[in-house]
Image (cartoon, rainbow, N blue to C red):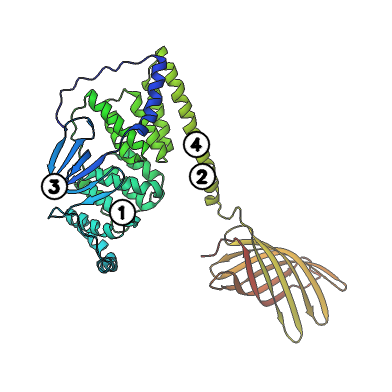
Amino acid sequence: MKDWQVTPPNFIVPKTGLSLLCLFAFIISPLLLSGQDYIYKTDHTIIEATVAKVSESEIEYRKYSNPKGPVYTIPRNSIRMIIYQNGEKETFNEDNKPQAVATSASVNSVITREPMSINKARMMLLSGDIRGAVSTYAQLAAIDSNNITLASEFAYALGINGIIDAAFMKLDKLWQNNAQNQEVRYFTAQLFNLIGHEQLSEAIRGNTDNSFAPAWISANAASLNSTYKTKNTTTSFTKNDYINKLKTANKLVARNMNLQSMLQFEEIISFFPEEYLPYLGYSIALEKAGMLKQSSQAIEKALLKTGNTPEANEKKKFLSQRLDMVNSKINVQKEPHQSNQNKKNNPESDNFQMLAYAGGMFTSGYASFNTRMGYFIGKSSNVAVDLGFQNSNSLTRVNIGASAYYRWKVLVYGSGVNASFGKDIKALYFKISAGPSFMNRKRTASYDIFWDINVAASKDNPSTFGFSIGRSFYFGKRKQYK
């Protein structure tokens, strides 16, 4: 942008009716604006334009910021690519002819080599061969345009190469359908960090898993961003710049190009921090991008900038309503989050987790059969109701009791109380059990070996020692053992 002598403009606050009209016009005006074309030059610069004509030798266009202005021409051999407002793309090779469509054989060849090629692009990026990395990513993207990983990394490589507009165009398209994809969010955050918008970078990282980072770049991202950090070279901003930038940013919001619009609003606000309209537009872009907390903060700043004059009351009323609407969305978002947080703190709180055990021991003079129905109260602990019978020396007893068990790796141990009933006998026993338990691969059942010690509560009854082999079955949504 050319240098201008800047005199801070004095914006006149309109009367109440006109003020509200301006507010609504600001919100709906993007729908009335025409789209723009992007001309990518071979020197890696980008022109925002409305293309009028493409001939064999030159391109004719008008500046997007001045659609009724003069027609400019540029040699066709200095153009690498044009992306039109409807998304269509036209590329040119060194002979100034549209590039030929790849044959099926060449497509299959590139797809076959893709894992090696993407690794090559990554190595180029990390080693400082940025143009080589961009070229390699571009070749892969031409073949596989639906690969989210590839597109995310390509956008970041473009940003490292200084082609910021193209980088954010790619990310905006990814963001529309893949806003929660971790790779998309990671490289978006890195790109904002690259151009010095740390707060936006942090806001995006705050909406995803902060620990996520692709292994190939996790240790090098900070160094890359520091080495290739882009500085804002804009030194002045006139009233006309303000109006044109505001229109452009607003139009980008309407087209769901929210990341690009954020950049525009950031620049506007840096030069005109006392104007409320940029904060309002910024809040819309942030809301559409899912950053509700930041959207709410932007509206609060807009409220502060409206002033305390009587004419500002209607604007404040409108902004307050919008603030309430955004905050209500934040509250709706918090409720499931809090529920999920409770599940995270107690992952078994809503699971019905149980086990059933059956086992015993049989010899010529002794037989026992025990069953147990248990309920898990923790990851590795359960409480159970015990029922069994025991026959020794022609004397049969029925045992009923309750116990608690705990697993530590393959060892299970527990204790409880048993009441024993039989002919001419009623006794209470304290039970201690321990032994190994071997879980199957699916962790749905285990083979268990228990040594049981029954200590009589009364001296009139003898204590006993038993041994049993059995099998446990686990069912319900029990958190599996590690």
Residue type at tag 3: Arg
Left or right: 141 in relation to 357 = left
In the displayed structure, 419 sits above or below 466; it is above
Mark 3 or 2 closer to N-term? Answer: 3
The residues tagged by marks 1 and 2 sit, at their Cα atoms, a distance apart of: 30 Å
Dot in front, 1 or 4: 1
Residue type at tag 4: Lys
Mark 3 or 1 closer to N-term? Answer: 3
Mark 1 or 2 closer to N-term? Answer: 1
The answer to which of 416 and 43 lies nearer the viewer is 43
Crowding at mark 4 (Cα within 10 Å: few <14, some 14-19, many 20+): some
Name the quadrant of the N terminus: top left
The residues tagged by marks 3 and 2 sit, at their Cα atoms, a distance apart of: 54 Å
Q: Which residue is mark 2?
A: 337
**What number is the disc on residue 76?**
3
Residue type at tag 2: His
Q: Which residue is mark 4?
A: 329
